[in-house]
Amino acid sequence: MKKLQTVLLLVIISLSSNLKGQAYEHSLGVRAGYSSGITYKGFLRHRMAAIEGDLLYNRHGLNLTALFEYHLEPFRDQRLMTYLGGGAFGGNWEGEFSLGLAGSAGIEFMVRDLPLNFSLDWKPMINLYRLFEVDLLDFGLSIRYRFSL
């Protein structure tokens, strides 16, 4: 009987080391920091890539940002991910209509027993239309509710 228990334990351990958890499908929440507002993230099916959309207000004005982000699990932990990406934004910059490029880099932690995730990120921006200006100090903390449709 002990041999059977040992074999079963070894099989379970070997299978669990090869399993990889999938990222959540959607999340919606708030971001607080230099730019604050509403944030949404949706993962592309069966991939570690996501689309993020933010409606954020900062000292320049109100902007809508769309980002493509690629996620990595650096420690093979299904709850901690890092991500890097970029995209575009448009809206108000110092009272003028603006368009520009935005980057994104951060760390995201998913709570196991609650449908919440927390991310700490950096989103540098370069305004290209009307006023050329660079803003590199956009750090923030996002709290999102995870859900599936």
Image (spheres, rainbow, N blue to C red):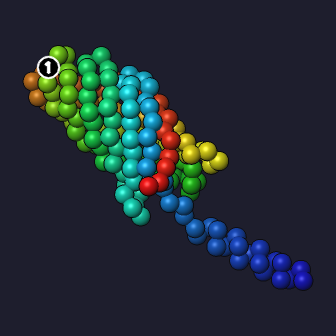
Count every numbered label the image shows and give the total.
1
Instruction: Tell me residue 149's x, y (percent).
Output: 44, 55
Q: Where is the N terminus found, in terms of image quarters? A: bottom right
Question: Which picture quadrant has residue 35?
Answer: top left
In the displayed orientation, state which residue is furthest to the left: 130
Position above or below: 107 against 122: below
- Compared across the picture, whether 18 is left or right of 89 comes to right
Name the residue located 51 percent from the left edge and 52 percent from the top edge.
74
Name the residue located 14 percent from the left edge and 20 percent from the top edge.
96
Q: Secondary structure at mark 1?
A: strand
Name the residue located 32 percent from the left edge and 20 percent from the top edge.
58
Q: Is residue 6 visible?
A: yes
In the displayed orientation, state which residue is furthest to the right: 1
Question: Which picture quadrant has residue 100?
Answer: top left
Amino acid type, mark 1: Glu
106, 144: nearer the viewer: 144
Q: Is residue 122 visible?
A: no
Instruction: Tell me residue 144's x, y (percent).
Output: 48, 39
Question: Which picture quadrant has residue 25?
Answer: bottom left
130, 64: nearer the viewer: 64
Badge 1, how many Cα within 10 Å: few under 14, some, many 20+?
A: few
Position above or below: 108 against 77: above
Instruction: Tell me residue 143's x, y (percent).
Output: 50, 35
- Residue that mark 1 sits on: 96
Name the residue located 23 percent from the left edge and 35 percent from the top edge.
89
- Compared across the picture, whether 37 is left or right of 98 comes to right
Instruction: Tell me residue 10's x, y (percent).
Output: 74, 75
